Amino acid sequence: MGRYRSWLRDRLSVRPWWMNLLMLFCAFIVFVYAPYDLFVKPVARDHDVWMGMVFTDWVAKVGDVLHWIVYAFGLYGFWRMRPWMWPWASLYVAQMAFGMLVWSIAFIPGTRGWVAGVLSGAALAVVAAALWRARARFQNRPTLAQRYGEWALVTGASAGIGLEYVRALAARGISCVMCARREERLEELAAQLERAHGIETRVVAADLAEPGGAERLLAAVADLDIDILVSNAGAGYAGRFIRQDPNRLRQMVELNCTAHVVLCAALVPAMVSRRRGAVIVVGSVAGRQPLPFHAVYSATKGFDLLFGEGLWAEVRDQGVDVLVVQPGPVKTEFEMVAGEARKNRSAEESAANVVAVSLEALGQSPSVVTTWFNWIRANVNRLFPRSTIAFVAGDLMEAQTDTRYL
Ligand SMILES: NC(=O)c1ccc[n+]([C@@H]2O[C@H](COP(=O)([O-])OP(=O)(O)OC[C@H]3O[C@@H](n4cnc5c(N)ncnc54)[C@H](OP(=O)(O)O)[C@@H]3O)[C@@H](O)[C@H]2O)c1
């Protein structure tokens, strides 16, 4: 109970009390008022007001959907204090102020209409002005270095998502330890980033799938305070399970699961004692459901999700933020390494987007799915029995797997 209270206190302390009330109002509209209007109120009795104009019948029903969307965005924007909320919320409330003025004068007879219109319009105008003046609250978050510290350790930094993490962190002035097996690539990248951003770097070549690989990496950073751990290195292995190489499967489990645990076990206690730090575990939407022909990979990513979210709840009130990042298909070397069949890559997300979304979500939630489309897919899954999802996913994955591995 105490843990829940402290989480709620933290969530509410990021905005002033009056903004919390606005957020509560949005929640009321989203979960109670708009669903009642939409599903319970008879069409003949429905009416909707926009910019002071009154709409009735089916037009009003469509308006209820729009209202629901507007308030759902409002709820999300306040909850996450998104930068776009600043102009959006103040302009929306300003149009409500105008609407209340016009509506009251037009529909409440006599002086009462004028009084009600001016009072309600003025009250809403004050709220609109307060939102307009609150720009800094939506936009001025402390930098990563201010929140967590100077040094990051990124695994899997030689390619794909890990490479983009290093670039993004370096651009924010954070010094980076880069780990992967291909040392030359890391050395080249380190030299580039030092020149471009004046940061310090350290290259550690290690195979995290081999026993003792993670320990070797930890020994190489023992003299540093690692403030941000990006545990990203991972690999897939597509194919029919009974035909797969057990040794490669074991290595995948070591890399995708054990390495995260060993690195966190060594680095998180020091973050907790400094009372600041961040851990990003790169999981996948593949971990949200069973995935035949990628069965072990999806299980490792399910492990990452549950491990990271559990750790999030343990250390969040000790100054350490944990985030599990769950991308869908991303344009990297992953597909080739995993043995997936080539598919249309234009629909794939960029590694830069994965990184941008996750750095924005860090400290705000325990996990994030990095595109809306994948978020919807991942959550629609929850509505069906896992057996059904396994059958459907099996058909899709079979088509996406290189025939040599089936
Ligand atoms: N791409 C996608 O579609 C996708 C989707 C969802 C989740 N993810 C996840 O995103 C993470 C990064 O994947 P990516 O897409 O960036 O793949 P990638 O382009 O293949 O990069 C993988 C990185 O991990 C490193 N790595 C692989 N095996 C390693 C080992 N045994 N020891 C140390 N480092 C190793 C690789 O470097 P070296 O080869 O030089 O060692 C490389 O830097 C993975 O955890 C993956 O599961 C990817």
Image: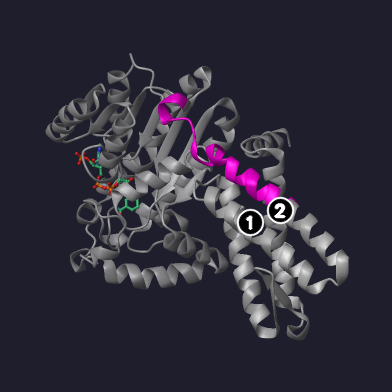
Residue 116 higher or lower than 222, as above or below: below
The residue depicted at 38 percent of the width and 53 percent of the height is 327
Q: Nearer the viewer, residue 110 or 185?
A: 110
Q: Amino acid at mark 2?
A: Leu
The residue labelled by disc 2 is 124
In the picture, measured across the screen, residue 108 lies left or right of residue 75, that is right
| Res. 30 in view | no
**Residue 300 image point, x, y percent:** 40, 48
**Residue 371 image point, x, y percent:** 41, 57
Does residue 88 belong to the magenta stretch?
A: no
* Residue 317 occupies quadrant: top right
The residue depicted at 28 percent of the width and 26 percent of the height is 177
- Residue furthest out toward the front: 111
The residue depicted at 47 percent of the width and 49 percent of the height is 368
Q: Nearer the viewer, residue 139 or 250?
A: 139
Q: Amino acid at mark 1?
A: Ala
CB within 8 Å, label 1 to label 2: yes
Q: Which residues are magenta?
A: 123-146
The residue labelled by disc 1 is 94
The residue depicted at 28 percent of the width and 24 percent of the height is 216
Mark 2, residues whose alpha carbon is within 10 Å: few (<14), some, or many (≥20)? Answer: many
Residue 122 higher or lower than 223, as above or below: below
